[in-house]
Every structure is written in structure tokens, then in C-alpha cells.
Image (tube, rainbow, N blue to C red):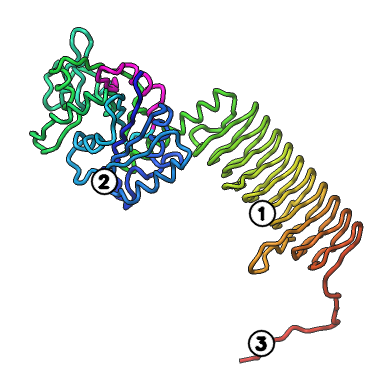
Amino acid sequence: MSAVDVVIMAAGKGTRMKSKLPKVLHRLAGRALLGHVVDTAAGLKPRQVVVITGHGAAEVEPALTQMVGDAAAFKLDFARQEPQLGTGHAVQQALPALADDGTVVVLSGDVPLTQLDTLQALIKSSGGDKLALLTLALPDPTGYGRIVRGADDAVQAIVEHKDATEAQRAIGEIYSGIMAVPAKLLRNWLGRVDNKNAQGEYYLTDIVKLAVADGVRVVGHKITDEVQVAGVNSPVQLAELERAYQRRQAHRLMEQGVRLADPARFDLRGTLQCGQDVAIDVNCVFEGTVSLGEGVKIGANCVIANASIAAGAVIHPFTHIDGEKAGVTVGAGALIGPFARLRPGARLGAEVHIGNFVEVKNSTLADGAKANHLAYLGDATVGERVNYGAGSITANYDGANKHRTVIEADVHIGSNCVLVAPITIGAGGTVGGGSTLTKSTAPGALSIGRARQASIPNWSRPKKAAK
């Protein structure tokens, strides 16, 4: 097989989106539409990907460069189409970047869900010497151009609906807008395409009649999955495609054994790996890279991003976990929430309990540690079996720098305590409720840092003066 180069058309204005954001940067499943297309293109192991930009190019080009990163196995190029004079004109802008020895796959930046195996089959159909069109069989093709095949099954023409005969309108096969074509032939045909039509534009589809005239076989690789070639032109279509994508992710997970309480109320905006007997309640959102171990239970209305949750852990409803770049890990059998928040760098051991309205950031909690109510642990190292009281916080920030709190094994922290870092609470120690500690404590000590209670008998509150 010849080398593969990919051309992605992403120059359109996207007027129907009614947005200042370029259409191809609108998000589906947490990723830009164009990002989905490039991800799929990367699976073809192309030499290069040429993205044709125009409207919003100053936003699209740096955004995509950042998405692709420096580790890409292909060369990323951009070609500007200014002004926009049709699809044929768009691909013409990419020609200087294309070598003649490859097969060019033409994609659209607003068609995000084409599958890799579909494109691989399309390239195979092209075979390095044919024009291959990705076609779609529709039960109602009204309004679309029809694929007209000859007696040998080769494509003879694409006929627009308004120009089609009754017999041609009965055809259910349409062109998707995706093709694979030898670069040398593409260059020749695009040089001969004209704009003698009502719109005064250069149409990429005109190369079909040029190929037929040149005796080059045009083949159609037909699929029946409309979602794979569905484009986004409006917020309504974007929402419809989002739900179609999420239904597929939900069904894939359920086929692997995951129990989803309602697949219609599930959102995956990244990757999710699940062990056996995982159960996920309604309205949960997974972002980035998430792994759930065997028997993990996720309660309703949780948002979990960039986290690894070990076997048997229970995430109660309304919990927010976001590891960002640092990640979050939750140990086996841990109980988290409800209404808990785990931030980047939270590392929780086995059987750890994090209760309602507890926030953990950049902290390690060893096996069996508990913070069950209304507490904050930031930049802390917490030992085994520590009990951290309600309303207690680590004061980790002095206004300029972050400092670490160390709470050694078997410490009991009373309610409403402030541990002013840097500080170490020695193993087995106890901190009396309501204490503010600024100095480290010895192992086994009871530490109290609060004013002595005073009571004034028969005291009367001030009263407002009579008017």
C-alpha cells in the first residue's frame, strides 16, 4: 500500500452555530470536533495531516497544534483557504504539501465520529489506483446527491437530487463527503475542475466525472451507519450527535459487564476502564482518564476526572473528583462522599473514609484514615488510622508559599482544629477540639491550644434603646 496523507477541511464559517467560536472547535464528548477527526486520522499512521483553515484560522491552528502536541507520529501542516470558493478549491490549497506517491484521504473537520476501520477499508478500496468514495445507504435519501453505479458496480456519477430522474431518486445510496484518492490523480483532476455552476464554486465532487472520463475506476465503499458520517452544522445537530456518541459508549461498557442505572443519563468525555461488577448510577460524568476497579460503585450525580479508583471503593452521590495533571488515587474499599471533593494529588489508601463536605488536595492518607465531616486537608501527609475531626483544617498557605502538615499514625484530631503548617503531629497523639496549633507535638501527647473558658454569671445582653 502507498503512503497515506490526510487532508481535513476546516475552513467553514459555521454560521448556523451562531457562535464566535469556530465550528470545528465546538466540543463533543469533551473534545473539539476537529480533535476527534485528527485522532481518527492518526490511527491511519499518515505521513502528514494537512488541515485547511480559513474562518477562525487564528484560533483553530494554535488550538489544534496544542491538541496534537510534540509527540505526534505525523507531520501537522496548515493551508489557508481565503476566500472560500468551494470544496474543490479547499483541497487545492493542500496540494503544495502533498507528494505524488501517496494516497490522500479527504475528511471534514465537522464530521467527528467516522471509525478508523471504515477509513482503512476505504483506503483498501482505493488500492493506490482508484478513486474511492465513502457512501451511505439511507432509508430516505431525499435532498442528497445519489450514487449512480454502472453494470460492473463502479460509480458512474453523483447526481444531485434536483437533477435526478425518478429512477435515480429511488436510489438510497449517497456520498458522505469522504474519499481516498491517489495524490497524483487528485492533482491532475483538481487542475481541471472549473466553477461553471450556479454558485460559482469549485466542487470536489466534480472529480468523479473527470475520473470516469479518464477511464479510472471509481468505487464506492458503502456503510449503513449514519452516525459515522454525520456532520455538525447547528447546536441541535451537535447535541444529537453527543447523545448518539454517549449511547454507543454506554452500550460498549454494558456489553463489558458494567451496570449503568440508565444509559441515557451517562456521559463519558475521555476514557473509562472498568473492572468486573462496576455499578454506575444516573447523571455521572467521566472526564480525562478514569479507571474503576472491580466492584466499584459510583453514586448518582458524580463528576470524576483523571482518577484511579481501586476495587471495592464506593463513591457516594454528588462527589467531585478531579485529578487534572497530578491525578487522584482512591484505595481499595475506600468510602468517599457524599458531597466530597478530591483535588489533584489526593492519594487515598485502603479503607480511607472521606465524608460529606470534606476537601482533599495534594495530600496522602494512609490506610484506614478518616475525615468524615466538613474538613480540609491540603498539602498533608496523614498516617494510618488517623481520625480527623469535623471542621478541622490544615492551614497550608502563608500568603506566599505552601507548607506541609504531617499527621503520624493513630493520631486523633478533635473538631474545629487549625493545624498551621509546617507542623508534625506525633504518632498516637491527640489534639483537643477547638485547638490552633503552630508547633509540632511529641508522640502520644495531648495537645490543646485554645483560650481558657470563662463564664460570667447573671450576665445580660445589651438592649436596644427605646425610641
Q: Secondary structure at mark 3?
A: loop
Distance Cα–Cα, label 1 vs label 3: 42 Å
Residue at 62% across, 32% down: 279
In x, y percent, where is residue 228? 36, 27
Q: What's the amino acid at mark 3?
A: Lys
Q: Secondary structure at mark 1?
A: strand
Q: Which residues are magenta?
A: 113-138
268 drawn magenta: no
Q: Nearer the viewer, residue 378 or 302?
A: 378
In x, y percent, where is residue 132? 27, 20
Q: What's the amino acid at mark 2?
A: Gly
Q: Secondary structure at mark 2?
A: loop
Q: Nearer the viewer, residue 42 or 167?
A: 42
Identify the residue position indicated by label 1 in the image: 359
Q: Nearer the viewer, mark 1 or mark 2?
A: 2
Q: What's the amino acid at mark 1?
A: Glu
Q: Nearer the viewer, mark 2 or mark 3?
A: 2
Residue 287 relative to residue 218: left or right? right
134 drawn magenta: yes
Q: Residue furthest top?
A: 151
What label does residue 54 carry, if any? 2
Of the numbered discs 2 and 3, the one sitting upstream in the chain is: 2
- 444 to 335, vertically: above or below: below
The quadrant holding residue 123 is top left
Residue at 30% across, 49% down: 56
Distance Cα–Cα, label 2 vs label 3: 71 Å
Q: Quadrant of the N terminus?
A: top left
Of the numbered discs 1 and 2, the one sitting upstream in the chain is: 2
Residue 84 visible in the picture = yes
Q: Residue furthest right?
A: 444
Residue at 16% across, 17% down: 212
Identify the residue position indicated by label 3 in the image: 464
